[in-house]
Amino acid sequence: MLDTKWKVPASGIPSDDDLKQMFVYNELLGAPRSVLLYPRTSTSRDVTGTYEARRHGCEQRSVGLSDGRTWSRLVITQQLVQLLSELLA
């Protein structure tokens, strides 16, 4: 499961509501993991964890949205292709 969030998480970590949403996706769909995808900031970090007493988990990943000056569809697309390649490997 992959869910994009177009907000920056407070304190650099997903909100309880976001994590609960991914937990439900994992439970209902039998997914072994899910990914919350946020816009990249200077404080962004990748985080991986599992839910208590469950075999499934959730990851937090981020993508940059600009080429340093303006929004860039090419930059976003390249990062998404790379991310999906990693997740599907």
Image (spheres, helix red, strand yellow):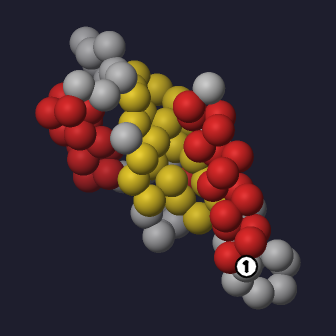
Where residue 36 appears, as percent x and y from the top left, is 45, 48
Q: Can you say whether 54 is above or below 38 in the image?
A: above
83 lies above or below 51: below
Q: Looking at the image, which residue sits at the far left?
A: 28
Task: Say which element carries label 1.
Answer: loop
Residue 10 appears in view: no
Horizontally, residue 66 falls left or right of residue 35, namely: right
**In the image, what residue occupies the spot 45% across and 42% down?**
35
Corner quadrant of residue 66: bottom right
Q: Residue furthest right?
A: 68
Q: Is residue 71 left or right of residue 14?
A: right
Left or right? Give the position of 29 relative to 65: left
Q: Is residue 84 left or right of residue 6?
A: right
78 lies above or below 57: below
Q: What residue is at 83 percent from the left and 85 percent from the top?
A: 69
Q: Please identify the quarter of the rendering in which residue 53 is found.
A: top left
- Please state the horizontal and vertical placement of residue 61, each as a whole percent of the image: 58, 46
- In what quadrant of the picture does the N terminus appear? top left
**Residue 88 appears in view:** yes
In the rendered view of the protein, which quadrant contains the C terminus?
top right
Badge 1 is on which residue?
Answer: 72
Residue at the (76%, 87%) spot, across then down: 70
Q: Position of residue 47 (x, y in %)?
A: 57, 36
Number of numbered tags placed on the structure image: 1
As shown in the figure, which amino acid type bears the numbered disc 1?
A: Ser
How packed mark 1 is, by other alpha carbons closer than 10 Å (few <14, some 14-19, many 20 or more), is few
At x 27%, y 15%, the residue is 54
